[in-house]
Image (spheres, rainbow, N blue to C red):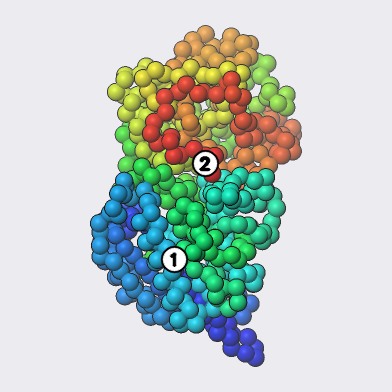
């Protein structure tokens, strides 16, 4: 890629070649989407703005090989359409679609595969040197660099090898802070403060991978090589370890800002579908704090086909004044091919006392918030009414199974497949259920919840907070309505545990004679909040309000100290639901994988 920076007096040319490595997966599949986003991000750098005018003629080297679909044809078509945007394009397809010898699957990395990737990268390095490029950017195509001026920022660090720290859904990132005497990863105390950006800057590390910039102008770069391994190399044949050993150059990781995102690596038994869904989840995580990425306009992609995933209805609750949440959730659901009905939330702040009285609403005698000792807020009143209206619609329409979600949640990896599997097992085993949480905050943390012997990833729900998402049966909706909760109201996430007889305050339960709601919870959970108390961007429409029957009493306390919306604390070993049946998906979807 050639960058032309025009100043008031001079015209500088900084040659750089970008090497994009396309993974062996389906570009053309609706389920994938890695390359349409990845190659569009490369083009988006051309449009980034700087204090001076920027022109971006580009040298581009694309290597693709051993694809089991028509990735090569689609990529060739893309290059034909965009080649005029680039100074130089090198196209080296390998039409061989056969697997490597002894390969167990598309995500299995044996020595032949490592060696092949090392040769491809060495060819890119050779090309960069042949055209006298000043820089070489090496990037896996499923690495999504959301910072449009990331290249300039890396160049300004003036390092021979420097990488932008990439975010993932776990502790995993594209650098190591420690290496064993055999060249493998070593945990060190220095890693997490850098990974969590508690320490910010550019740090010397023994290893960077996935996306990094090489400064070929520097003397030290002349010894860089991806292949063959250094004559003294005797460790395992792994491309990143071989490069780190051969380089003998200090590497740096920069975490001054969020530069981009990438998926957690899959295990060797994973499928292409697993990889595609993992990448999709990366895109969903980006949308929590950023605008959605758009696929290249030069590619023709099949339209998505949203459906209700086997539910009679999917309800998504949203306040009209929270348009940003609504748009994010609709796009997030669309990306997962899930359709929904947007339910306008009841805005508690807009209700006056006479309207509340006209609906026959009365607060449960003696109710006080467990943390602050206050009565119900208007925000909590509006939240309850929003869910109550959905329960009424379920009963009126006779909907056998429904999914209810709020607009401030983020989805776990493999969400759709895991929820479908849970619904199938519940149906197959004829589970007698009324409500199943898919997202909650577990409040009973003294002992484990009871697991089910024949159903994976499900426990009997104990005392819980939050109504982020739950499955509700027709019978369950009727039970909730039968309790006439408007005449003895408390927050909806306190009401539900009362109805399944697991609330710790017996005085509350005494007001509801029939507490026979059959409630369960996904384990592990399938959705989590987008923000917790104290996070940047945290907004609560339930807690930051006024008391339900007195608008002069404000409840906008110090939100950083609000305990109800804090992240779930780590459970003790004795309280963990360790005996729950785990599906195969849980083997590589753990949130703490490193």
- Residue plotted at (73% across, 24% down): 373
Q: Earlier in the sequence, mark 1 or mark 2?
A: 1
Q: Secondary structure at mark 1?
A: loop
In this rendering, does residue 444 appear at all?
no
Compared across the picture, whether 191 is left or right of 245 comes to right
Q: Looking at the figure, which quarter contains the C terminus?
A: top right
- Residue plotted at (31% across, 19% down): 430
* Numbered badge on residue 364: none
> Image quadrant of residue 472?
top left
Kindly report which numbered mark, 1 or 2, lies closer to the viewer in this rendering.
Answer: 1
The residue to which callout 2 is attached is: 593
Q: Real-space Cα distance between discs 1 and 2?
A: 31 Å
Say if 585 sits above or below 130 in the image. above
Image location of residue 43, percent across then percent down: 45, 70
Q: How many marks?
A: 2
Image location of residue 80, percent across then percent down: 31, 75
The residue to which callout 1 is attached is: 228
- Residue plotted at (42% across, 24% down): 581
Badge 2 density bin: few <14, some 14–19, many ≥20, Cα 10 Å: few
Image location of residue 573, percent across then percent down: 59, 24
Say if 578 sits above or below 123 in the image. above
Compared across the picture, whether 199 is left or right of 487 comes to right
Q: Secondary structure at mark 2?
A: loop
> Image quadrant of residue 491?
top right
């Amino acid at each position: 890629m050639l960058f032309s920076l025009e100043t008031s007096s001079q015209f500088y040319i900084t040659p750089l070649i970008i090497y994009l490595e396309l993974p062996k997966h389906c570009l053309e599949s609706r389920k994938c989407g890695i390359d349409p986003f990845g190659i569009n991000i490369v083009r988006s750098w051309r449009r980034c703005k700087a204090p001076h005018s920027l022109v971006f003629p580009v040298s581009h080297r694309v290597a693709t090989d051993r694809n089991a679909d028509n990735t090569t044809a689609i990529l060739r078509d893309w290059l034909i359409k965009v080649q005029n945007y680039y100074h130089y394009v090198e196209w080296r397809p390998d039409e061989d679609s056969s697997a490597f010898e002894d390969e167990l699957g598309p995500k299995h990395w044996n020595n032949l595969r490592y060696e092949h990737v090392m040769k491809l990268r060495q060819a890119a390095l050779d090309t960069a040197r042949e055209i006298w490029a000043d820089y070489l950017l090496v990037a896996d195509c499923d690495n999504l660099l959301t910072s449009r001026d990331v290249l300039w920022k890396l160049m300004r660090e003036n390092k021979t090898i420097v990488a932008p720290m990439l975010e993932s859904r776990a502790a995993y990132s594209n650098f190591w802070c420690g290496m064993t005497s055999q060249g493998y990863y070593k945990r060190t105390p220095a890693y997490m403060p850098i990974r969590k950006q508690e320490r910010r800057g550019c740090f010397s590390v023994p290893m960077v991978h996935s996306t990094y910039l090489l400064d070929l102008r520097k003397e030290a770069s002349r010894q860089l090589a991806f292949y063959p391994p250094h004559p003294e190399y005797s460790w395992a044949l792994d491309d990143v370890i071989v490069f780190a050993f051969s380089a003998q150059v200090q590497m740096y990781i920069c975490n001054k800002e969020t530069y981009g995102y990438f998926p957690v690596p899959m295990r060797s038994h994973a499928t292409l579908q697993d990889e595609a869904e993992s990448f999709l989840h990366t895109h969903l995580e980006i949308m929590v704090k950023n605008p959605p990425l758009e696929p290249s306009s030069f590619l023709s992609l099949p339209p998505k086909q949203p459906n209700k995933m086997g539910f009679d209805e999917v309800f998504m609750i949203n306040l009209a004044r929270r348009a940003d949440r609504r748009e994010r959730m609709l796009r997030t659901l669309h990306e997962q091919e899930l359709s929904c009905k947007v339910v306008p939330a009841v805005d508690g702040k807009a209700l006056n006392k006479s309207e509340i009285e006209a609906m026959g609403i009365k607060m449960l005698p003696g109710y006080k918030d467990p943390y602050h000792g206050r009565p119900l807020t208007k925000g909590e009143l509006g939240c309850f009414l929003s869910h109550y209206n959905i329960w009424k619609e379920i009963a009126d329409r006779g909907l056998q199974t429904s999914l209810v979600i709020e607009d401030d949640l983020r989805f776990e990896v493999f969400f759709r497949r895991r929820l479908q599997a849970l619904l199938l097992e519940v149906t197959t085993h004829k589970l007698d259920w009324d409500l199943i949480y898919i997202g909650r905050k577990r409040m009973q943390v003294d002992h484990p919840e009871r697991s089910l012997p024949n159903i994976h990833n499900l426990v009997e729900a104990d005392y819980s907070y939050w109504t982020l998402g739950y499955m509700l049966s027709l019978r369950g909706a009727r039970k909730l309505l039968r309790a006439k909760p408007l005449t003895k109201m408390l927050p909806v996430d306190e009401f539900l545990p009362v109805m399944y007889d697991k609330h710790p305050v017996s005085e509350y339960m005494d007001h509801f004679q029939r507490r026979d709601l059959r409630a369960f919870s996904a384990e592990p959970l399938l959705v989590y909040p987008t923000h917790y108390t104290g996070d940047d961007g945290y907004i609560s429409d339930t807690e930051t309000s006024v008391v339900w029957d007195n608008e002069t009493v404000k409840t906008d306390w110090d939100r950083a100290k609000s305990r109800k919306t804090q992240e779930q604390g780590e459970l003790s070993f004795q309280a963990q639901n360790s005996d729950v049946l785990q599906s195969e998906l849980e083997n590589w979807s753990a949130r703490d994988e490193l």
